[in-house]
Image (cartoon, grey):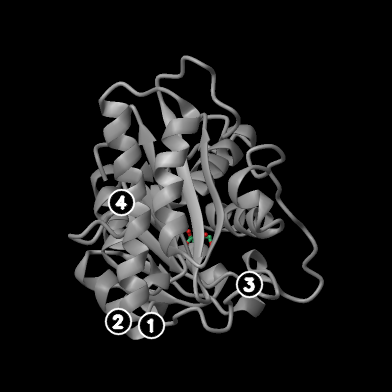
Amino acid sequence: MTTVLRKPAEFRQVCDDARANSHRVGLVPTMGALHEGHFSLIDEAKKRADFIAATLFVNPLQFAPDEDLDRYPRTLESDLAGCSQRGVDVVFAPEPDSMYPAHFQTQVSVSELTKPLEGGFRPAHFDGVTTVVAKLFNLTGPCTAMFGRKDYQQWKILSRLAHDLDMPIEVVGCPIVRESDGLALSSRNRYLSASERERALSIVSGLRRAHDAWAEGDRSVETLRTLAAERVRAEFDAVDYVSVVDPDTLLTPAESANRLLIAVAAHLGTTRLIDNVVLGEDPRP
Ligand code: PAF
C-alpha cells in the first residue's frame, strides 16, 4: 500500500525511517497528471533503489503569471492509483502553503545552464524548479532521483545543482517516452484538439529528419537545424526556438562535435510543447 502524506515533516520522517532501516531511497519528483513517461521514471527508480518516494506537486514558483498554473491538470485520484500499482512506497502531495509558508524568501539558482533555450522564454522558470527540487532533495534524502529527458535542460541543471552543492544524489535522466506515432508524452498533450494533436507530430518529424541526415553523415549545424525547423514552422502557430547546441554546455557546439542536442519549443494554440533529440547518442525518435 502506498502511503500518502501532505505535510513536509511527516514525509521527511518516513524517508528518515526508510534510510535508518538501510533502504536506498529513490525519488521521483512530478507535478502529477501522471502518464507512462512518469511511470517509466518509477520503474527506473526501482532498479536503483528499494524504497520509492514520488512527489505530486504543481509548483507555483516555476510558472510565470501568464502561464498555465491554474489550468495545469490535477488528477490526484488516478495518480495515486498509478503510484500504488507501480509500487511506489510513499507519495508526498503537499499543499503550496506547506512548501512555501509565510516569510519564505530563499531561492536556489543555477547561473549559466539556465540562460539558453527555455531560459530565453521562461526567465524565472528554472529558479522555481531548482528551489523546489532542492527542498524535495532535502526532505527526502534520496541516493538517486529520476527526471525525464523531455525536459533535457532541466535534467542538466538539476545534475549541476546536486554536483555544485555536494548533494550525494545520483541525478538520472531517463529516455523520452513517446506515443506509437512518435509524439513525446506530456501532461500538456491533453490540452490539444484532435487537429492540433495531428499537427504536433511535425516536431518529431523534424527531429527524425535531422536524425536521418546525421546518420547519413551530415554534420552542418545549420543544415540540421533547418531540416528540423522547416517541419515545425509549417505546422505550429508560433515557434520559440529550434536550436542545435552542445548537449553538455547547451551553448554553440564545436565544429567537429560528435554529439549535438536539437531542442524545440513551439506553440499550438494556447499549448506549448517541447521535445528534443541528442544526435550521436539517442536512437531515432
Ligand atoms: O519536471 C517536472 O515535472 C517539474 O519541473 C519538477 C521537476 C517536478 C519540479 O517541479
> Who comes first in sequence, dot 3 or dot 1?
3
> Who comes first in sequence, dot 3 or dot 2?
3
Amino acid identity at mark 4: Ser
Residue at label 4?
A: 205
Amino acid identity at mark 3: Pro
The answer to whether residue 146 is visible is no
Residue 75 location, quadrant: bottom left
Q: What distance separates the C-alpha of mark 1 from that of mark 4? A: 30 Å
**Quadrant containing the N terminus in the rendered view:** bottom left
> Who comes first in sequence, dot 1 or dot 4?
1
| Mark carried by residue 60 | 3
Residue at label 2?
A: 78
| Mark carried by residue 75 | 1
| SS class, disc 1 | loop
Q: Are marks 3 and 2 in contact (CB under 8 Å)?
A: no
| SS class, disc 3 | helix
Residue under the image location 44 percent in, 80 percent down = 73
Q: What distance separates the C-alpha of mark 3 from that of mark 2? A: 22 Å
Amino acid identity at mark 2: Ser
Which one is closest to the eye, mark 1 or mark 4? 4
Q: Is residue 59 above or below residue 137?
A: below
Q: Is residue 271 above or below residue 112?
A: below
Q: What distance separates the C-alpha of mark 4 from that of mark 2? A: 32 Å
